[in-house]
Image: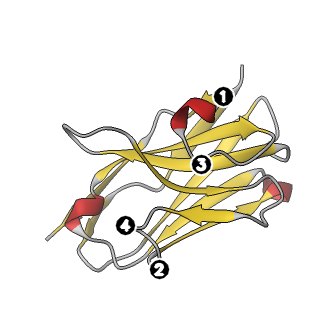
Amino acid sequence: QLQLVESGGTLVQSGGSLRLSCTASGFTLDDFAIGWFRQAPGKEREGVSCISSGGSILKYADSVKGRFTISRENAKNMVYLQMNSLKPEDTAVYYCAAAWGLIQTAAPGYDYWGQGTQVTVSS
């Protein structure tokens, strides 16, 4: 069974940091671009960041640019989202998703999704 699993979400104070992790079971991430998305209550799912399969192309939403960093360790089958200077508006369920081949910025381009991890930023 092909599965993505996120971890690292928790409650953190405004200004704090978290690192989210995404790993896969049943397949390796080497040939997949990975995206991080988030969905806050009552809002649509939005793209946060994405990284190409080789890690050379990185993209960020304007709202997180300069605060979040995406990275990957293909040898460990892991992708990370380092989140610094967190704000209450970053509160959401964060999902990682995998797209075979080229990097994708929109959700429909992704083939596999995790179940999400909750990030709550208190003011």
Q: Position of residue 60 (x, y in %)?
A: 53, 64
Task: From this view, report whether residue 69 is shown above or below residue 61.
Answer: below
- Between the residue at mark 3 and the residue at mark 4, the CA separation in whole angstroms equals 15 Å
Amino acid at the residue labelled 2: Gly
Task: Identify the secondary structure beneath mark 2.
Answer: loop
Q: Callout 3: 10 Å neighbours few (<14), some, many (20+)?
A: many
- Between the residue at mark 2 and the residue at mark 4, the CA separation in whole angstroms equals 9 Å
Residue lying farthest to the top in this orientation = 1
- Between the residue at mark 2 and the residue at mark 1, the CA separation in whole angstroms equals 28 Å
- According to the image, label 4 marks what residue? 63
Q: Position of residue 13 (x, y in %)?
A: 23, 72
Do tag 1 and tag 3 residues touch (Cβ < 8 Å)? no
Mark closer to the chain start, 2 or 1: 2
Image-based side of 15 in relation to 48, left or right: left
Quarter holding the C terminus is bottom left
Q: Which mark is residue 111?
A: 1
Mark closer to the chain start, 1 or 3: 3
Do tag 2 and tag 3 residues touch (Cβ < 8 Å)? no
Task: Identify the secondary structure beneath mark 1.
Answer: loop
Q: Which mark is residue 8?
A: none
Total numbered badges shown on the rendered structure:
4
- According to the image, label 3 marks what residue? 35
- Between the residue at mark 2 and the residue at mark 3, the CA separation in whole angstroms equals 17 Å
